[in-house]
């Protein structure tokens, strides 16, 4: 048996379905995943990561035409229990289907 505290990881995913134009058909799906990590098991969160991904069906064919994803990661590098600006990274990605680009 070891006296070393174990890391604790908590992850929650929420999904939202959106009918933007009110026609009863889903136009967008947004998924938000938040992960909290206590690396050393001391009860203080050391890493937070949240990813929000949204898929839009612009043409009404049931297929995603645009996908946007933003991931924010904060790592308490100095161990002070707070996330300073230099400990936070934001990554954004947008994908657009060729059909939408061609339609202009």
Image (cartoon, grey):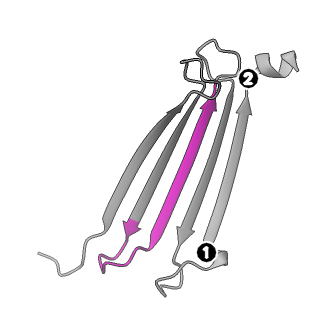
Return the x and y of residue 45 as percentages of the image width and height.
Answer: 40, 73
Front-lying residue, 69 or 57:
57
Mark 2 surroundings within 10 Å by alpha-carbon count, few (fewer than 14), some (14 through 19), many (20 or more): few
Task: Say if 104 sits above or below 13 in the image.
Answer: above
At horizontal 48% and vertical 37% (from top left) the residue drawn is: 16
Residue receiving disc 2 = 97
Residue 40 occupies quadrant: bottom left
Q: Secondary structure at mark 2?
A: loop
Q: Which residues are magenta?
A: 37-56
- Left or right? Give the position of 63 relative to 5: right
Q: Quadrant of residue 30?
A: top right
Above or below, comparing residue 86 to residue 17 in the picture: below
Q: Quadrant of the N terminus?
A: bottom left
**Residue drawn 58% across the image and 41% down it:** 53
Mark-to-mark CA distance, 1 and 2: 34 Å
Name, please, the residue furthest toward the top: 61
User: Are there few (<14), some (14-19), or many (20+) residues within 10 Å of tag 1?
Assistant: some
In the figure, 70 relative to 87: above or below?
A: above
**Residue drawn at x 24%, y 77% as measured from the top left:** 5
Residue 52 drawn at (x, y percent): 56, 47
Element under label 1? Answer: helix
Q: Quadrant of the C terminus?
A: top right
Q: Residue furthest right?
A: 104
Is 50 part of what is drawn in magenta?
yes
Q: Which residue is mark 1?
A: 87
């Amino acid at each position: 048996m070891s006296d070393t505290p174990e890391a604790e990881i908590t992850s929650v995913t929420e999904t939202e379905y959106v009918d933007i134009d009110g026609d009863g058909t889903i136009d967008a799906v947004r998924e938000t995943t938040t992960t909290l990590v206590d690396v050393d098991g001391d009860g203080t969160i050391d890493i937070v990561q949240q990813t929000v991904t949204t898929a839009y069906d612009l043409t009404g064919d049931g297929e995603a035409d645009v996908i946007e994803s933003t991931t924010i990661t904060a790592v308490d590098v100095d161990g002070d229990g707070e996330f300073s600006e230099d400990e936070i990274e934001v990554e954004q990605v947008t994908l657009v289907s060729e059909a939408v680009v061609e339609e202009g």
